[in-house]
Image (cartoon, helix red, strand yellow):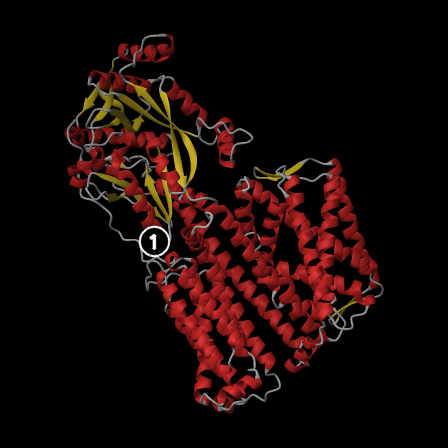
């Protein structure tokens, strides 16, 4: 299992790096194409064309942008109705708008846009699977619009279709358009007559009705038409008869940008439009820049404000500054990480473009030229540093906070001293002020121990820096490059400053490749405890699952008084606590909150496994998601009896085995070592017969040192041990239980029933109050239609998953003993992080880190 997981992780990592490398390569190809397409265009010409865009054109583009985003909100309205979870338009509009503004600019729609939808829709009562269905249906609607617009433009377009140097014949274009129209009609017909839902591997998605399918196509067509028109009206002198060709080029550019997975389609979208639209490229390039601001960046700013406002309404107490700070601390890391990355991008782009001549002339009258040159280089280096530090802010690292704040202040100063770029200085100081206000959100320790950077982050940095360098070469293409440019220092030598800044950026990146800062301190190997410390707390334990402390695969966090501990282990990024804390109940809240703080400071996620009602309230206060895991069977030994019709089967089995000469005995812990040569073959045979291997963490394993810590219940036949179970018992005799239960083929039928009944009768005779039969996973979960997704899945597995595990059979077996059922829960982070935590839990149980034990850790005599 471990090898398989390792292979899966390795393959996933390779795919991530390959995908990121492919994205960087596509961006590079896009920039090369842009360089080729704009080789005759000069920066001054673009600036002049930009100035020729009139106010009326800008207003028209803004109105069409509003219309496009209004149509986008209907994507979600329709998707919510299709999945049967309609919400008010304002809620759907918020989810749609924040989602699309993020995904349009950042790419990776499932992660960026999906996260925004998840935040909005879960707050409105939807669960994760329903949100995933909404995302899928909205995505399908978008693609319907793209294809419908492309197909319609192909049918309407007259004459051959020129795309750069490629000319598509008219009949081919018409044939493709007809094919798209036929496919759309076939989809509507399928929705009218086909199945109401489609699925894959247990996950299903409802199909729309024919009317809803037509609405999807119509809404998406309106959205794409408005978005394309917003760019079209910005092109000076664009003739109306150009519209079909332009719309087709726009749809093609959208398709290529989406397939490439380039964030925001930067470079790729522009290259396709420039290649496919037969107009003056200087004017079109200026229109594309204006369009990028109006359709992408302005809605992104509004989307962030809307998302902050939504979070504020959820969490912010009215007129409470403390609540405002709590809200800010909660959303600051991701937003300020993005702002820091954006600030670095602004500084890099500014360093690649010429300074404003008038400002630079005024500056050099007061500031020496060498200081201006140094400030220009320093501002670009600061921008590079901000790119590299941004992930540290996302991870709440204190070192990243201090470095980013210092760099932002320095960047503001250098912006002023390199050309009085007060706009950049305002941006940097604003971000620095927000960082200072939310400084409490950045509390995690920083270490100088490196961990490989994520592929997505490396790709993002490469794209930004590659784009900034391309902008510089575009701006200075008229310059005759030579060696002396590196050493020229003059007020008008912007190209020389750009080259020196590019070299400095390369040096900084090279250094960063070897020195990876702002990572969490590594998890210590410690938090182990002496046998005496553990035994002292076990002496006051109320539950037998506390004996899991002696398996040798746990870490321990003790209370200040040493009268309680929580046992846990770390796997991956998951900090997994086993069962309720052990010892004095008054210490439980402090222990769990301390463990939560330790996990949080190490950038981990906390998972509480198999907790009971005593821990449930604490977990709720900690804001963890509560999932019912199953129920534990508890037998009241004071009332236990073999009499009565309900116990007839157990009574008959017990009497039959007694008649057949099977005997029961309790072997004391001090004598177990001498018995191990007889127990070992039984254990090995059981593992082989069950095709099992030893596990850990949530149960013990057949280890001589572990076995020697406990009494052992054995069943003998003709003097030979045929079954055994090691006995867990609390010192105060409140609870009795077993851990390992194994038998071989020589054991008669029903031997485990015999062992359980005999042990319960022995416990009853020795004044134990209850017997814990263990957990029945997924039992007691109704899985009703209105239940959360986990409840529905768990109920389905319990009812129909016998081939996978035997959930119902295990419940039925324990039901024979007429137990009381106590619920057990899992508490952990919300969303996908809970699934990742459960994956780490499964890996920990399958392959726990085990240290050899000393019998000195045995609990005190009972």
The reply to whether residue 492 is in sight is yes
Left-right relation of 665 to 349 = left
> Compared to 89, does 430 lie above or below?
below
Depth order, front residue of 823/573: 823
Q: Quadrant of residue 682?
A: top left
In the picture as drawn, the residue positioned furthest to the top comes out as 644
Q: Position of residue 223 (x, y in %)?
A: 71, 55
Q: Position of residue 611 (x, y in %)?
A: 35, 34
The total number of labels drawn is 1
The reply to whether residue 505 is in sight is no
Depth order, front residue of 448/297: 297
Depth order, front residue of 346/580: 346
- Locate the N terminus by quadrant: top left
Q: Position of residue 805 (x, y in %)?
A: 44, 30
Depth order, front residue of 541/313: 313
Which residue: 39% across, 38% down?
620
The residue wearing badge 1 is: 601
Which residue: 81% across, 53% down?
178
Left-right relation of 416 to 481 = left
> Compared to 194, does 35 lie above or below?
below
Q: Position of residue 50 (x, y in %)?
A: 68, 75
């Amino acid at each position: 299992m471990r090898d398989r997981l390792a292979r899966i992780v390795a393959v996933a990592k390779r795919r991530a790096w390959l995908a990121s490398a492919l994205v960087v390569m596509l961006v590079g190809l896009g920039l090369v194409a842009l360089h080729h397409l704009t080789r005759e265009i000069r920066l001054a010409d673009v600036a002049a064309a930009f100035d020729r865009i009139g106010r009326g054109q800008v207003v028209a583009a803004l109105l069409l942008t509003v219309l496009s985003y209004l149509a986008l909100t209907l994507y979600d309205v329709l998707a919510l109705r299709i999945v049967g979870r309609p919400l008010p338009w304002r809620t759907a509009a918020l989810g749609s708008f924040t989602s699309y503004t993020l995904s349009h600019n950042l790419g990776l729609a499932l992660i960026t846009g999906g996260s925004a939808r998840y935040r909005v829709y879960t707050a409105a009562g939807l669960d994760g699977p329903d949100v995933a269905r909404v995302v899928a249906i909205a995505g399908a609607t978008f693609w319907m619009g793209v294809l419908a617009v492309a197909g319609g433009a192909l049918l309407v377009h007259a004459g051959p279709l020129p795309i750069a140097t490629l000319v598509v014949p008219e009949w081919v274009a018409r044939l493709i358009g007809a094919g798209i129209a036929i496919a759309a009609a076939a989809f509507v017909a399928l929705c009218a007559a086909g199945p109401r839902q489609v699925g894959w591997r247990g996950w299903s998605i409802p199909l729309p009705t024919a009317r809803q399918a037509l609405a999807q196509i119509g809404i998406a067509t309106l959205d794409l038409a408005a978005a394309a028109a917003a760019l079209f009206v910005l092109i000076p002198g664009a003739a109306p008869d150009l519209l079909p060709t332009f719309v087709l080029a726009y749809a093609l550019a959208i398709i290529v940008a989406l397939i490439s997975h380039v964030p925001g389609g930067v470079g790729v979208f522009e290259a396709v439009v420039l290649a496919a639209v037969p107009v003056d490229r200087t004017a079109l390039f200026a229109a594309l820049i204006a369009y990028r601001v109006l359709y992408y960046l302005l809605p992104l700013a509004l989307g962030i404000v809307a998302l902050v406002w939504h979070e504020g309404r959820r969490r912010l107490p009215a007129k409470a500054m403390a609540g405002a700070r709590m809200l800010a601390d909660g959303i600051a890391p991701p937003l300020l990480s993005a702002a820091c990355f954006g600030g670095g991008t602004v500084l890099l782009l500014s360093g690649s473009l010429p300074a404003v001549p008038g400002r630079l002339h005024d500056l050099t009258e007061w500031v020496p030229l060498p200081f201006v040159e140094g400030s220009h280089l320093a501002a670009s280096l600061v921008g590079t540093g901000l790119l590299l530090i941004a992930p540290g802010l996302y991870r709440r690292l204190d070192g990243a906070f201090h470095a980013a704040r210092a760099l932002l202040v320095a960047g503001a100063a250098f912006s002023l001293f390199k050309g009085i770029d007060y706009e950049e200085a305002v941006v940097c100081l604003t971000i620095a002020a927000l960082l200072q206000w939310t400084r409490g959100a950045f509390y995690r320790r920083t270490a100088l121990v490196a961990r490989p950077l994520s592929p997505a982050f490396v790709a993002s940095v490469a794209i930004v820096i590659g784009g900034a360098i391309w902008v510089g070469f575009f701006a200075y293409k008229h310059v005759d490059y030579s060696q002396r440019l590196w050493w020229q220092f003059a007020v008008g030598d912007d190209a020389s400053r750009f080259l020196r800044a590019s070299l400095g950026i390369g040096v900084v990146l090279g250094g960063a490749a070897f020195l990876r800062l702002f990572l969490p301190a590594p998890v210590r190997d410690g938090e182990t405890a002496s046998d005496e410390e553990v035994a002292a707390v076990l002496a006051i334990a109320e539950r037998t699952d506390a004996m899991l402390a002696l398996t040798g695969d746990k870490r321990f966090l003790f209370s200040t008084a040493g009268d309680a501990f929580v046992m846990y282990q770390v796997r991956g990024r998951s900090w997994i606590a086993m069962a309720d804390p052990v010892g004095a109940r008054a210490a439980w809240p402090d222990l769990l909150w301390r463990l939560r703080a330790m996990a949080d400071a190490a950038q981990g996620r906390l998972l509480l496994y198999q907790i009971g009602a005593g821990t449930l309230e604490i977990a709720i206060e900690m804001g963890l998601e509560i999932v019912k895991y199953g129920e534990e069977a508890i037998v009241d030994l004071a009332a236990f009896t073999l009499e009565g019709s309900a116990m007839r089967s157990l009574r008959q089995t017990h009497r039959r085995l007694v008649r057949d000469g099977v005997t029961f005995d309790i072997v004391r812990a001090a004598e177990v070592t001498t018995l191990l040569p007889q127990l070992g073959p039984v254990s090995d045979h059981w593992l082989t017969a069950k095709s099992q291997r030893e596990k850990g963490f949530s149960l013990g394993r057949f280890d001589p040192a572990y076995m020697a810590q406990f009494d052992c219940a054995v069943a003998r036949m003709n003097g030979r041990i045929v079954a055994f179970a090691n006995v867990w018992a609390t010192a105060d005799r409140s609870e009795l239980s077993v851990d390992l239960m194994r038998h071989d083929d020589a054991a008669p039928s029903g031997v485990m029933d015999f062992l359980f009944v005999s042990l319960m009768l022995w416990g009853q005779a020795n004044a134990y109050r209850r017997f814990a039969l263990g957990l029945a996973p997924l039992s007691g979960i109704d899985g009703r239609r209105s239940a959360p997704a986990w409840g529905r899945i768990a109920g389905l597995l319990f009812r129909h998953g016998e081939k996978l595990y035997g959930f119902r059979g295990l419940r039925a077996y324990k039901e024979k003993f007429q137990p009381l059922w106590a619920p057990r829960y899992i508490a952990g982070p919300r969303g996908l992080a809970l699934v990742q935590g459960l994956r780490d839990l499964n890996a920990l149980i399958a392959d726990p880190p085990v240290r050899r034990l000393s019998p000195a850790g045995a609990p005190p005599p009972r």
